[in-house]
Amino acid sequence: MMTINIDDYKKALSKFAAGVTVVTTLHEGRPIGITASSFSSLSLDPPLVLVSLKKTLFTHQVITASGLFAVNVLGARPLALGMRFADMRPGIADRFTGLAVETAVTGCPLLSGSLAWFDCRVWAAYDGGDHTIFVGEVAAVCAADLETPLLYHDRQWRRSAALDAPA
Protein backbone atom coordinates (compact mmCIF):
# COMPACT_ATOMS: atom_id res chain seq x y z
CA MET A 1 0.00 0.00 0.00
CA MET A 2 1.26 3.46 -0.89
CA THR A 3 1.89 5.85 2.01
CA ILE A 4 0.07 9.17 1.70
CA ASN A 5 1.79 12.33 2.93
CA ILE A 6 -0.75 13.88 5.33
CA ASP A 7 0.17 17.46 4.32
CA ASP A 8 -0.36 16.62 0.64
CA TYR A 9 -3.65 14.94 1.54
CA LYS A 10 -4.87 18.01 3.45
CA LYS A 11 -3.82 20.32 0.62
CA ALA A 12 -5.69 18.22 -1.94
CA LEU A 13 -8.81 18.15 0.24
CA SER A 14 -8.65 21.93 0.68
CA LYS A 15 -9.28 22.37 -3.05
CA PHE A 16 -12.85 21.11 -2.65
CA ALA A 17 -15.15 24.01 -1.74
CA ALA A 18 -17.67 23.10 0.94
CA GLY A 19 -20.45 24.93 2.69
CA VAL A 20 -20.06 25.87 6.34
CA THR A 21 -22.57 24.63 8.90
CA VAL A 22 -23.09 24.69 12.63
CA VAL A 23 -24.09 21.29 14.00
CA THR A 24 -26.12 21.60 17.20
CA THR A 25 -27.58 19.29 19.80
CA LEU A 26 -28.61 19.31 23.47
CA HIS A 27 -26.65 18.13 26.49
CA GLU A 28 -28.64 17.90 29.72
CA GLY A 29 -31.07 20.48 28.34
CA ARG A 30 -28.31 22.94 27.35
CA PRO A 31 -27.55 23.76 23.71
CA ILE A 32 -24.12 22.94 22.28
CA GLY A 33 -22.77 23.30 18.79
CA ILE A 34 -19.72 23.19 16.57
CA THR A 35 -18.79 24.50 13.12
CA ALA A 36 -18.46 21.77 10.49
CA SER A 37 -18.01 21.60 6.73
CA SER A 38 -18.43 17.84 6.42
CA PHE A 39 -22.14 17.88 5.56
CA SER A 40 -23.99 16.42 2.60
CA SER A 41 -27.38 15.36 1.37
CA LEU A 42 -27.78 11.60 1.12
CA SER A 43 -31.31 10.51 0.23
CA LEU A 44 -34.67 11.95 -0.77
CA ASP A 45 -36.73 8.93 0.28
CA PRO A 46 -36.38 8.83 3.19
CA PRO A 47 -34.97 12.35 3.60
CA LEU A 48 -31.43 11.76 4.90
CA VAL A 49 -28.39 13.99 5.41
CA LEU A 50 -24.97 13.18 6.79
CA VAL A 51 -22.43 14.95 8.91
CA SER A 52 -19.02 13.67 9.91
CA LEU A 53 -17.55 14.60 13.32
CA LYS A 54 -14.24 13.83 14.93
CA LYS A 55 -14.64 11.16 17.62
CA THR A 56 -12.77 13.16 20.27
CA LEU A 57 -15.25 16.08 20.16
CA PHE A 58 -17.70 16.56 23.01
CA THR A 59 -20.42 17.26 20.43
CA HIS A 60 -19.74 13.80 18.95
CA GLN A 61 -20.24 12.16 22.35
CA VAL A 62 -23.49 14.03 22.94
CA ILE A 63 -24.95 13.14 19.53
CA THR A 64 -23.97 9.50 20.05
CA ALA A 65 -25.82 9.48 23.39
CA SER A 66 -28.86 11.56 22.44
CA GLY A 67 -29.43 10.41 18.87
CA LEU A 68 -30.37 13.97 17.89
CA PHE A 69 -28.73 16.80 15.97
CA ALA A 70 -29.50 19.77 13.75
CA VAL A 71 -27.49 21.22 10.90
CA ASN A 72 -27.61 24.98 10.34
CA VAL A 73 -26.30 26.14 6.93
CA LEU A 74 -24.50 29.48 7.28
CA GLY A 75 -24.73 32.38 4.89
CA ALA A 76 -21.79 34.55 3.89
CA ARG A 77 -22.80 37.57 5.97
CA PRO A 78 -22.79 36.18 9.54
CA LEU A 79 -19.14 35.11 9.38
CA ALA A 80 -18.77 35.84 13.11
CA LEU A 81 -21.34 33.13 13.84
CA GLY A 82 -19.22 30.49 12.16
CA MET A 83 -16.13 31.76 13.96
CA ARG A 84 -17.95 31.62 17.31
CA PHE A 85 -18.83 27.94 16.89
CA ALA A 86 -15.35 27.11 15.54
CA ASP A 87 -13.95 28.40 18.85
CA MET A 88 -12.21 31.26 17.05
CA ARG A 89 -13.68 33.93 19.35
CA PRO A 90 -11.70 33.85 22.62
CA GLY A 91 -13.58 34.77 25.75
CA ILE A 92 -16.97 33.35 24.72
CA ALA A 93 -17.86 30.80 27.38
CA ASP A 94 -21.33 29.99 26.03
CA ARG A 95 -21.53 30.00 22.24
CA PHE A 96 -25.31 30.55 22.36
CA THR A 97 -25.28 33.67 24.54
CA GLY A 98 -27.18 36.48 22.83
CA LEU A 99 -28.22 34.41 19.82
CA ALA A 100 -31.76 34.01 18.53
CA VAL A 101 -32.53 30.28 18.61
CA GLU A 102 -35.65 28.34 17.83
CA THR A 103 -36.53 24.65 17.88
CA ALA A 104 -38.63 22.32 15.75
CA VAL A 105 -39.29 18.60 16.28
CA THR A 106 -36.23 17.32 18.19
CA GLY A 107 -35.62 20.35 20.39
CA CYS A 108 -32.11 20.85 18.97
CA PRO A 109 -31.12 24.51 18.58
CA LEU A 110 -31.84 26.08 15.20
CA LEU A 111 -29.97 29.31 14.55
CA SER A 112 -32.16 32.18 13.35
CA GLY A 113 -30.76 33.70 10.19
CA SER A 114 -29.40 30.42 8.81
CA LEU A 115 -29.80 29.88 5.08
CA ALA A 116 -31.33 26.51 5.87
CA TRP A 117 -31.60 24.08 8.74
CA PHE A 118 -32.23 20.36 9.07
CA ASP A 119 -33.62 18.98 12.34
CA CYS A 120 -32.58 15.31 12.55
CA ARG A 121 -32.74 12.04 14.42
CA VAL A 122 -29.74 9.74 14.02
CA TRP A 123 -30.75 7.10 11.47
CA ALA A 124 -27.35 5.36 11.43
CA ALA A 125 -23.76 5.94 12.51
CA TYR A 126 -20.74 4.57 10.66
CA ASP A 127 -17.09 4.33 11.58
CA GLY A 128 -15.06 6.75 9.50
CA GLY A 129 -11.54 6.37 10.90
CA ASP A 130 -10.99 9.21 13.37
CA HIS A 131 -14.54 10.46 12.60
CA THR A 132 -18.05 9.05 12.83
CA ILE A 133 -20.42 9.54 9.93
CA PHE A 134 -23.81 10.38 11.41
CA VAL A 135 -26.72 9.85 9.03
CA GLY A 136 -29.69 11.89 10.11
CA GLU A 137 -33.30 11.35 9.15
CA VAL A 138 -34.71 14.82 8.64
CA ALA A 139 -37.70 15.45 10.91
CA ALA A 140 -38.12 19.12 9.92
CA VAL A 141 -36.47 21.45 7.42
CA CYS A 142 -36.47 25.14 6.57
CA ALA A 143 -34.85 27.12 3.76
CA ALA A 144 -34.55 30.88 3.35
CA ASP A 145 -33.69 32.90 0.28
CA LEU A 146 -31.44 35.32 2.13
CA GLU A 147 -27.99 35.36 0.56
CA THR A 148 -25.13 33.28 -0.77
CA PRO A 149 -23.56 30.59 1.42
CA LEU A 150 -20.39 30.81 3.44
CA LEU A 151 -17.78 28.56 1.82
CA TYR A 152 -14.68 26.79 3.09
CA HIS A 153 -12.01 26.53 0.40
CA ASP A 154 -8.23 26.33 0.47
CA ARG A 155 -8.29 26.39 4.30
CA GLN A 156 -10.12 29.74 4.40
CA TRP A 157 -13.70 30.88 4.73
CA ARG A 158 -14.88 32.66 1.62
CA ARG A 159 -17.77 34.50 0.07
CA SER A 160 -18.45 34.03 -3.63
CA ALA A 161 -20.05 36.76 -5.66
CA ALA A 162 -20.06 34.29 -8.55
CA LEU A 163 -22.86 32.42 -6.79
CA ASP A 164 -25.12 35.45 -7.08
CA ALA A 165 -25.51 34.95 -10.85
CA PRO A 166 -25.79 31.63 -12.67
CA ALA A 167 -22.90 30.79 -15.00
Image (cartoon, rainbow, N blue to C red):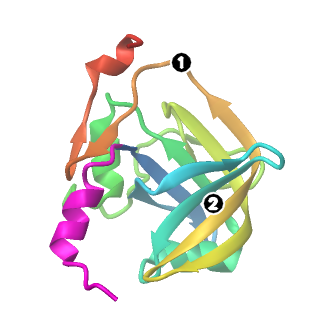
Q: Residue at the right extreme?
A: 45
- Residue tagged by mark 1? 145
Side (left or right) of 93 relative to 75? left
Q: Position of residue 39 (x, y in %)?
A: 51, 53
Residue at left offset 27%, top offset 18%: 161
The earlier-in-sequence mark between 1 and 2 is 2
Q: Residue furthest top?
A: 165
Residue at 38%, 61% in the rendered image: 94
Quarter containing the C terminus: top left
On screen, 14 above or below 133?
A: above
Magenta span: 1-17
Q: Position of residue 92 (x, y in %)?
A: 28, 59
The N terminus, quarter of image: bottom left
Mark 1 burial class by Cα count in 10 Å: few <14, some 14-19, many 20+: few
Instruction: Name the residue that disc number 2 marks.
Output: 69
Residue drawn at 32 percent across, 64 percent down:
93
Position in image of residue 73 (x %, y %): 49, 40
Q: Is 79 on the left or on the right of 7, as rendered?
A: right
Residue 60 included in the magenta stretch of the image = no
